[in-house]
Image (cartoon, rainbow, N blue to C red):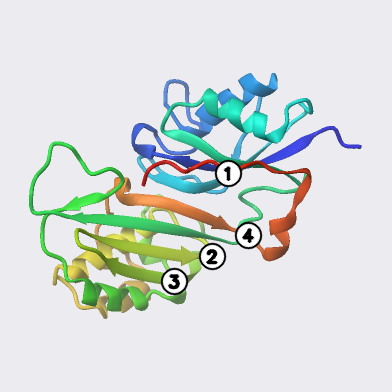
Amino acid sequence: MNSTRNIKLVVAYDGAAYHGWQRQSAGIDTVQERLEDAAARVTGHPVTVLGASRTDTGVHAAGQVANFYTTNASIPLEGLRRAINSRLPGDIAIRSAQEVSINFHASRWAVGKTYRYRIRLSPLRTVNPVAQAWLYAKPLDDEPMRLAARRLIGTHDFRGFATSAEIRQNTVRTIYRCDVCRGDFEIVVSVEGNGFLYNMVRNIVGTLVEVARGHWEPEHVDKALASRDRRDAGPTAPAGGLTLLCVHYLPEDASVAGTGGAAAAEDQLPQ
């Protein structure tokens, strides 16, 4: 019998205080580092936490998925989750823990992700920034924004929506859904796809905002897709408005639990 346990985590965090997900050099605070340090203190051995998405500096998550291996078999799942949470800062929370197949890998097994971007509409300047939203002071017309968003749905080469730091050769991705919803005080953009390039969602939002403020027609999205030129897309929207909502897996991978089952879920961080 394999004595190693593979623990799948669903994690929420406010990314404002962190330099992204991925562990970096000493002295740079990241979400991965915080989780690894807390898990190591609980399990009694070094831990590497594998995340499904390397969220950037200032980006948040409500449903980041991660996994780690442990040889500590004495701690029940719920006790493990609670113990790690007690050693994390208040802006990071493990929402659930589940013992899964030893082969499960949070990143390699993922088949899609959903992101949400919030734009808070306010003509007033404030010294207290609205949490997890881009405070936008000018009027935005959501209808042309919605029309432009629909043109992104499908399989396209999104090179024009990636920053220069993107090094992957294959920049073709499929967007299943790109919704624009307006409330009394904000516009919310939700994007679901099979994968995303570096800063792709923030560049999509920046482009949609240029359409919403009347700088471009909705059809301009076609030009950015066809040219593959970053200069034809809009500016990169601020990181603080972006949240990784959830990571998607194939239906058959939803039942990868071992004998430990799933731990009780915990409320996510305030959104």
Q: Position of residue 85 (x, y in %)?
A: 54, 29
The residue wearing badge 1 is 265
The amino acid on which the numbered mark 1 sits, given as a three-letter code, is Ala
Do tag 1 and tag 2 residues touch (Cβ < 8 Å)? no
Q: Residue furthest left?
A: 124
The amino acid on which the numbered mark 4 sits, given as a three-letter code, is Tyr
Mark 1 or mark 4: which is in front? 1
Q: CA distance from mark 1 to mark 4?
A: 18 Å
The residue wearing badge 2 is 194
Q: CA distance from mark 2 to mark 3?
A: 10 Å
Q: Which mark is residue 177?
A: 3
**Going by the image, does 202 lie left or right of 120?**
right
Q: CA distance from mark 1 to mark 2?
A: 26 Å
Q: Position of residue 211 (x, y in %)?
A: 20, 71
Q: Position of residue 226 (x, y in %)?
A: 36, 77
Query: Which of the 4 image quarters holds residue 205?
Result: bottom left
**Circle 4 SS class:** loop
Q: Which residue corresponds to the image point at 42% horizontal and 26% vertical from the top-left? A: 28
Q: CA distance from mark 4 to mark 2?
A: 10 Å
The residue wearing badge 4 is 249
For residue 224, above or below residue 1:
below
Do tag 4 and tag 2 residues touch (Cβ < 8 Å)? no
For residue 213, above or below residue 82:
below
**Circle 1 SS class:** loop
